[in-house]
Image (tube, helix red, strand yellow):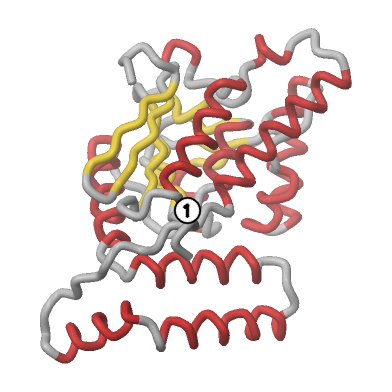
Amino acid sequence: MSADASLLVRTAGAVTTLTINRPQAYNALDADVLAGLRAAVLAAADDPAVRVVVIDAAGEKAFSAGADLKELSGMGPDEAHATMRAGQQALRDIERAPVPVVAAVQGLALGGGFELALSATFPVLSTRASLGLPETSLGLIPGYGGTQRLPRAVGPRVAAHLMLTGSRLEADRAYALGLTPVPPVAPGELATTVAKIAAAIARQGPDAVRSVLTALESGRDAALDAGLHLETGLAALAVASAESDEGITAFLERRPARFAEPATKEQA
């Protein structure tokens, strides 16, 4: 893809990196970028050689400052409804992709940018990251899932405060609230840190990783007993798999496991 494209896609080894490339617009998420992110994540999920997807952004100022307001301005309710649903669907498909998605957040992640980070499997933040859903200051509300995902991530009271006041979360506070599992890193170390995390994920059993994601997604809002039932089935399949045979044998032989590529949907 050309360097002037709004979304850059590159694959190196088992990792596909998607770079939002609109630094002049603070990497705002217009319809083309959202559709491109969705398509690229789904394509990666269908590629058995890809074990991890990383989403990052060009420049140092912003991961994404949110939806493209120029695109939204002047829309009537029907057009706005269609646009919101398309954005929601893009992020929902990213959220439930059967391949881990790691968001590398440098600088601002506001509005739709924060919603994109929330839809990732998890984000990794630079110390300069600043997160927020400031839509109410514009007479708007979050429309790409923020009102639903943020309360699930930090609790309803913290989420209400952030959305009703337009306050921002700095990186350390976001880590304290559990929005990221990794302590914030210096800006110059973000890419290296994310690359190490992606490499660690890529070393795991690929079918096992996908099963964990299935269990997390399906059990997110399920009753505990239903989630445990699902886990039992997935765990039993894992125990009986060639992948676990290799993993256990490698452990006993004290060598790195050599996992085969996971089956594609067509092969499953």
Q: Position of residue 151 (x, y in %)?
A: 71, 54
Tally of numbered tags:
1
Q: In the displayed structure, does residue 54 sit left or right of residue 94? A: left
Q: Quadrant of residue 254?
A: bottom left
Pick out the residue farthest to the right: 77
Q: In the displayed structure, does residue 113 sit left or right of residue 175? A: right
Q: Position of residue 206 (x, y in %)?
A: 35, 65
> Considering only vertical position in the picture, is 249 above or below 101?
below
Task: Name the residue beneath numbered marker 1.
Answer: 122
Depth check, front residue: 185 or 45: 45
> Considering only vertical position in the picture, is 243 above or below 176?
below
Depth check, front residue: 179 or 168: 179
Q: Classify 10 Å Cα crowding around label 1: few (below 14), some (14-19), many (20 and above).
A: some
Quadrant where the N terminus sits is top left
Q: Position of residue 263 (x, y in %)?
A: 40, 63
> Considering only vertical position in the picture, is 151 above or below 65?
below
Q: Residue at x 66, y 66 (%)?
A: 220
> Considering only vertical position in the picture, is 78 above or below 146?
above
Q: In the displayed structure, does residue 96 sit left or right of residue 12? A: right
Q: Residue at x 36, y 41 (%)?
A: 126
Q: Residue at x 67, y 40 (%)?
A: 89
Depth check, front residue: 209 or 170: 209
Q: Determine whether the residue tagged by mark 1 lies in a helix, strand or loop.
A: strand
Q: Residue at x 43, y 57 (%)?
A: 264
Depth check, front residue: 48 or 115: 48
Pick out the residue farthest to the front: 267
Q: Amino acid at mark 1?
A: Phe
Q: Position of residue 44 (x, y in %)?
A: 41, 45
